[in-house]
Image (cartoon, rainbow, N blue to C red):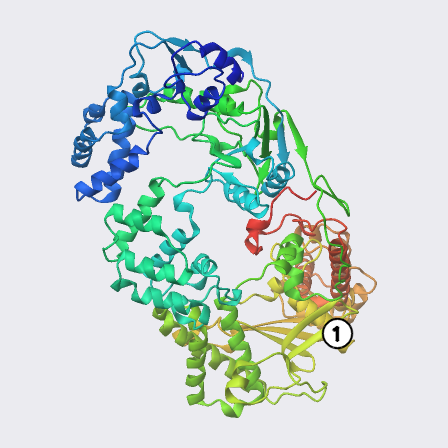
C-alpha cells in the first residue's frame, strides 16, 4: 500500500460546485472549499456535520456537559469527567445517547445521571441526532472519515465524493536534522513576520517542539496562533503551583518554585535551589512563604486577588472560570485544588485570539491545514493516536479514520516540508506507526527512507546555517584539578557543560565542607574545642545544613555529626605534634566557617594547602600535610581500598570510575620532595559510624594509605623491601625464598623486567615467569615446592604493584595530564567539538552531571 494522493481543494471544489450542501470531515477543509466559491451562495455550502447541525461553530460539548453535571450533582469531578467522556464517545461511535447503558460495566450510577442530564441539554451531539437535511442536493466528501453519529445527518440520497485518488502521493524527502534546535533554526531561516500568514506548522501538541516553536516565534516577533491555550497561561500555571506549594509541606525546595519566581521576576542564586523553601531566609522568597502560610484562611477568589496585586495584572477570565465551577468563594483546600487542576488539564477553556500569523496545528487534532507552506515537525511515534479501548469502538474502522486523516495531513499545503530527527538522546527515533501501513519499503528510522540530512559541520567554521557569531580569542588552560580531570576523562562534553551550567549547592557538599572546615580549625586551635564546644559545633552544623534536610532527620544527623567530629579529633590528636617549618608560611586559602564563628584565624601552611603547578598542569588543595612525606585528605564518603585507589588512577585505559586525586597530589608533591618515598592517606571519618555504635570501632579501619616509591617497579622487585614481602606471604612462598636467601634473589632479579600486565593468567604464561621459576629452582633445595613458591611470589609482587605508585606510574600520569590539557585547549580554540566519549571510550553515564544535554551519536 502507498500513500494515496489527496484531491486538491480546487479539484474538490470543481466536483462539488453544483451541489447545495457539501459535507466534509474537517472544518479547515470546509473553509478552504468555501474560499473557492466564485458565485453567490445562499446558506451553508461546505461544512462539517457538527457545524451544520449546531448552526454555528462547534462548542466544546464535553466541557459544557461537565459544568452542567458538576453544578447539578455532588459526584467527584474525576468520576463525572470519566463518565462524560465515555457517554460522548459511545454516542459518537454508536449514534445514540443511551447506547452506553447497554454496557453493564460502564452503566454505573454516575453514568446514568450523566445520560439523564445530557438528554435535557442542547449539545452538538443531540442536534446531530435530531438533524436531517431536506430538499437539498448533498455531496459528501471523505465519507469514510465520518463517525456513525455524523452519518445521522445524511439524507437518503447524496453524492459521495472520494477524498483520495487512485494515484500514489509522491512524498517529499524527510529532512533529517541533528537536533530539535536545528529544526527550529531551519524554520526561522524561512519564516518571517511578512510571510507568517502563508505558513503552518504541524506538530504534536505535547512534544518538545511545541514550546520551542512558540518561544522561537515570540523571540523573533513572528505572529502565530493555534498554540498555547487557556491552561498554558504562565500566570495561571504559576498561581496553581503557588497554591500547591502551600500543601507540599516542609520538604518543598526553592527549586520546586522556580517557575513562580520567574513569574514574579525574582532571581534566586542557584546555590539555594536545593534548600528547603521554609528553612532558607532570603528576600526573594519572603512573599511566597507569606502567601503559603496564609492560604488556609483564604478563598480561591481572595487568593487570586493577592496574586494579582503582586503581579500587577488582572486574571479576569480565570476568575470567571472559578465562578462557573462554583468554587470562587470556597476555601482553598488541597482536594479542591486537585479537582481544579484536573479540570484545567482535561478541558479546553475557549480563549479569544487573533487568527493572524503562523498557524500551529496539532498533529492529532487536525485533518487538513490550508496554508501554502506547511512544516511537519517530528513525524514520530507521538503522532500515532492511542486507539480508544472501549467495547463500543470498532477498532478497525477507527484505525482507518486515523490513517485517512494522517494521509490528508501529510499532503496539506502546496509545499510540504517534513523536518525530523533520526536520533534523539542517543536512541533512534521511531517514525509514526502509520507509515508502516502506508509504505512498501522496509525501515527502522527516518534515514532508511528517502531523506536529506542537514548537518552543522564543525571544522573551525560553521556551515549549513548562516549565523553571525562573535569572534573571541580563546583563553588557554594551563592547569587542571582532579575533579575537572575525572569529569573530562569520563566525558569531555560533560566537562564542557560543567563549565557552562552552574549547579546548586548539594547537601553532601555542604556537610563535607563543614567537616573540612572543622578539621582545618582544629589543627590550629585544639584548645578551643572541648566536650561542650563539640556539642556547640554540632548545633552550628545542624543549623547551617538545615535548609537541605527535613527536621525528622535531625536526630540521625546530630549523631552522625558528633561521631564524625569525634573521629576527626581522635585522629588529629594522635598525629600531634605537627611539623610545619618545612613549608612556606601561609595566610590560609578561602574562608573557614568555624574560624569566622570563633573569630580565630586559620593560617597553618599544613592545612588546606593550595597548589598550582603550571609546569605539571596540576592544581588542587591538600587537606592536611600530616608529615613532610605524608599527605592526607578528609573524606565523608565510603571507604576505598588501596587497590581501588590505584585502579581508579589507571590511564591506559582509564577506569570506569576514574579518580586521579592520589596520583595528582603525589605527582605535585614529589616535585617538591624528589627522590623521597611518599604516602597519601584517605581518612574516611564517617565510614565507622556503625562500628562506633556497635562498640567495635578502630580508627585504623577508616584509613586508606597508598605509597609512592621514587624508583621503578623493576628496581623495587629486586630490593630487600620486596624480598621481605615474600617472606611474609603464602606458606610455599615463605619456604621457597627463605631457602633461596636475599643475595640469590637479588642476583636472579638483576636485569629482569617484570611484565607490564597485571592479569594473573598473562603473568603465569609470561616468559618472565618461566625464567624466574627456573632460576629459583636451580638455587633451592628439593625440600621446597619451587613452582608454587615462585607462582605465589609473582602474585605477591603483582599485588604490591596494584596497591602503590612507582616512578613510571607517575611519569606516565604526568604525560597523560599534559595530553589532556593539550586536547582540551584545542577544543576550547574551536578545533572540533568536545566529544561525548573520553579516552576510555563511552562514558560512564552514572557519573555524568548533564545527562540530558549529552546527545549520543552527535559527535560530528
Q: How many residues crowd around disc 1 within 10 Å: few (fewer than 14), some, or many (20 or more)?
A: some
Query: Disc 1 on helix, strand or loop?
Result: helix
Q: Position of residue 180 (x, y in %)?
A: 58, 41
Please report the residue visible at 26 percent of the width from the left and 49 percent of the height from the top.
323
**Up-down relation of residue 786 to residue 60 (above or below):** below
Name the residue nearer the viewer: 225 or 416.
225
- Residue marked by disc 1: 670
The total number of labels drawn is: 1
Please report the residue visible at 45 percent of the width from the left and 42 percent of the height from the top.
228
Q: Position of residue 493 (x, y in %)?
A: 65, 52
Give the image quarter of residue 600.
bottom right
For this view, does 85 lie left or right of residue 673?
Answer: left
Residue ranking furthest to the right: 751
Name the residue nearer the viewer: 743 or 105.
105
Give the image quarter of residue 117.
top left
Please report the residue visible at 32 percent of the width from the left and 45 percent of the height from the top.
342
Name the residue nearer the viewer: 282 or 828.
282
Residue ranking furthest to the front: 40
**Up-down relation of residue 461 to residue 26 (above or below):** below
Q: Position of residue 181 (x, y in %)?
A: 60, 43
Q: Position of residue 559 (x, y in %)?
A: 40, 76
Please report the residue visible at 56 percent of the width from the left and 65 percent of the height from the top.
640
Residue 365, can we see it?
yes
For this view, does 791 lie left or right of residue 596?
Answer: right
For this view, does 777 lie left or right of residue 443?
Answer: right
For this view, does 336 lie left or right of residue 241?
Answer: left
Amino acid at each position: 500500500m502507498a500513500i494515496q494522493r489527496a484531491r486538491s481543494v480546487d479539484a474538490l471544489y470543481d466536483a462539488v460546485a453544483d451541489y447545495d450542501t457539501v459535507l466534509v470531515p474537517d472544518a479547515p477543509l470546509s473553509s478552504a472549499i468555501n474560499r473557492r466559491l466564485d458565485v453567490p451562495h445562499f446558506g451553508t455550502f461546505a461544512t462539517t456535520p457538527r457545524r451544520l447541525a449546531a448552526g454555528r461553530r462547534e462548542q466544546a460539548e464535553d466541557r459544557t456537559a461537565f459544568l452542567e453535571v458538576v453544578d447539578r450533582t455532588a459526584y467527584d469531578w474525576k468520576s463525572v469527567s470519566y463518565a462524560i467522556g465515555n457517554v460522548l464517545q459511545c454516542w459518537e461511535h454508536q449514534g445514540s445517547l443511551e447506547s452506553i447503558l447497554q454496557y453493564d460495566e460502564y452503566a454505573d450510577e454516575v453514568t446514568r445521571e450523566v445520560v439523564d442530564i445530557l438528554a435535557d441539554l442542547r449539545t452538538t451531539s443531540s442536534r446531530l441526532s435530531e438533524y436531517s437535511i431536506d430538499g437539498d442536493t448533498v455531496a459528501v466528501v471523505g465519507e469514510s472519515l465520518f463517525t456513525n453519529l455524523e452519518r445521522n445527518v445524511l439524507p437518503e440520497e447524496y453524492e459521495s465524493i472520494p477524498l483520495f485518488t487512485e494515484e500514489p502521493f509522491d512524498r517529499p524527502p524527510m529532512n533529517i536534522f541533528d537536533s530539535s534546535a536545528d529544526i527550529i533554526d531551519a524554520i526561522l531561516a524561512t519564516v518571517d513576520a511578512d510571510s507568517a500568514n502563508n505558513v503552518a506548522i504541524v506538530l504534536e501538541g505535547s512534544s518538545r517542539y511545541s514550546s520551542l516553536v512558540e518561544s522561537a516565534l515570540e523571540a523573533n516577533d513572528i505572529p502565530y496562533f493555534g498554540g498555547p491555550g487557556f491552561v498554558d497561561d504562565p500566570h495561571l500555571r504559576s498561581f496553581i503551583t503557588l497554591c500547591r506549594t502551600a500543601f507540599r509541606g516542609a520538604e518543598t525546595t526553592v527549586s520546586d518554585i522556580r517557575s513562580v519566581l520567574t513569574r514574579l521576576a525574582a532571581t534566586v542564586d542557584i546555590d539555594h535551589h536545593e534548600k528547603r523553601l521554609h528553612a532558607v531566609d532570603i528576600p526573594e522568597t519572603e512573599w511566597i512563604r507569606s502567601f503559603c502560610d496564609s492560604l488556609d484562611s483564604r478563598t480561591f477568589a481572595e487568593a487570586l486577588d493577592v496574586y494579582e496585586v503582586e503581579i500587577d495584572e488582572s486574571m479576569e477570565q480565570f476568575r470567571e472560570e472559578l465562578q462557573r465551577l462554583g468554587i470562587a468563594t470556597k476555601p482553598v483546600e488541597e482536594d479542591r485544588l486537585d479537582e481544579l487542576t484536573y479540570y484545567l488539564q482535561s478541558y479546553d477553556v475557549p480563549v479569544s485570539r487573533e487568527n493572524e500569523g503562523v498557524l500551529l496545528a496539532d498533529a492529532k487534532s487536525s485533518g487538513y491545514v490550508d496554508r501554502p507552506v506547511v512544516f511537519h515537525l517530528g513525524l514520530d511515534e507521538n503522532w500515532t493516536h492511542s486507539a480508544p479501548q472501549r467495547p463500543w469502538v470498532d477498532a478497525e474502522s477507527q484505525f482507518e479514520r486515523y490513517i485517512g486523516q494522517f494521509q490528508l495531513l501529510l499532503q496539506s499545503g502546496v509545499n510540504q516540508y517534513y523536518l525530523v530527527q533520526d536520533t534523539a538522546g542517543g536512541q533512534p527515533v521511531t517514525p509514526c506507526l502509520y507509515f508502516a501501513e502506508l509504505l512498501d519499503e522496509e525501515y527502522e528510522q527516518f534515514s532508511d527512507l528517502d531523506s536529506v540530512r542537514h548537518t552543522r559541520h564543525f571544522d573551525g567554521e560553521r556551515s549549513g546555517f548562516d549565523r553571525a557569531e562573535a569572534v573571541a580569542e580563546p583563553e588557554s588552560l594551563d592547569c587542571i584539578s582532579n575533579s575537572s580531570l575525572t569529569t573530562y576523562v569520563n566525558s569531555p562534553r560533560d566537562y564542557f557543560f560543567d563549565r557552562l551550567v552552574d549547579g546548586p549547592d548539594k547537601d553532601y557538599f555542604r556537610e563535607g565542607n563543614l567537616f573540612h572546615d572543622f578539621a582545618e580549625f582544629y589543627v590550629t586551635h585544639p584548645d578551643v574545642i572541648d566536650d561542650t564546644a563539640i556539642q556547640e559545633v554540632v548545633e552550628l552544623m545542624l543549623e547551617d545544613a538545615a535548609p537541605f534536610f527535613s527536621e525528622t532527620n535531625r536526630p540521625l544527623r546530630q549523631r552522625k555529626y558528633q561521631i564524625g567530629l569525634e573521629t576527626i579529633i581522635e585522629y588529629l590528636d594522635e598525629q600531634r605534634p605537627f611539623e610545619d617549618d618545612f613549608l612556606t608560611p601561609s595566610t590560609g586559602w578561602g574562608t573557614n566557617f568555624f574560624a569566622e564563628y570563633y573569630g580565630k584565624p586559620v593560617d597553618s601552611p599544613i592545612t588546606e594547602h593550595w597548589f598550582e603547578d603550571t609546569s605539571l598542569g596540576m592544581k588542587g588543595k591538600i587537606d592536611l600535610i600530616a608529615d613532610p612525606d605524608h599527605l592526607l585528605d578528609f573524606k565523608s564518603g565510603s571507604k576505598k581500598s588501596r587497590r581501588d585507589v590505584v585502579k581508579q588512577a589507571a590511564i591506559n585505559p582509564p577506569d570506569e570510575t576514574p579518580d586521579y586525586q592520589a596520583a595528582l597530589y603525589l605527582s605535585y608533591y614529589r616535585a617538591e620532595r624528589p627522590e623521597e618515598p611518599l604516602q597519601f592517606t584517605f581518612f574516611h571519618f564517617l565510614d565507622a559510624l556503625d562500628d562506633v555504635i556497635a562498640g567495635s570501632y578502630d580508627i585504623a579501619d577508616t584509613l586508606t594509605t597508598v605509597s609512592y616509591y621514587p624508583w621503578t617497579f623493576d628496581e623495587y622487585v629486586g630490593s630487600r623491601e620486596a624480598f621481605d614481602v615474600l617472606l611474609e606471604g603464602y606458606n610455599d612462598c615463605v619456604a621457597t625464598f627463605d631457602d633461596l636467601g636475599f643475595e640469590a634473589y637479588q642476583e636472579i632479579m638483576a636485569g629482569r623486567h617484570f611484565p607490564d600486565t597485571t592479569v594473573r593468567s598473562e603473568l603465569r604464561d609470561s616468559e618472565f615467569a618461566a625464567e624466574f621459576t627456573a632460576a629459583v629452582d636451580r638455587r633451592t633445595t628439593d625440600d621446597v615446592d619451587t613452582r608454587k613458591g615462585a607462582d605465589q611470589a609473582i602474585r605477591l609482587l603483582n599485588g604490591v604493584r596494584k596497591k602503590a605508585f612507582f616512578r613510571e606510574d607517575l611519569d606516565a600520569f604526568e604525560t597523560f595530564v599534559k595530553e589532556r590539557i593539550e586536547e582540551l585547549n584545542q577544543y576550547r580554540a574551536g578545533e572540533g567539538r568536545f566529544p561525548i566519549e573520553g579516552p576510555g571510550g563511552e562514558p560512564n553515564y552514572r557519573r555524568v552531571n548533564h545527562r540530558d544535554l549529552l546527545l549520543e551519536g552527535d559527535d560530528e
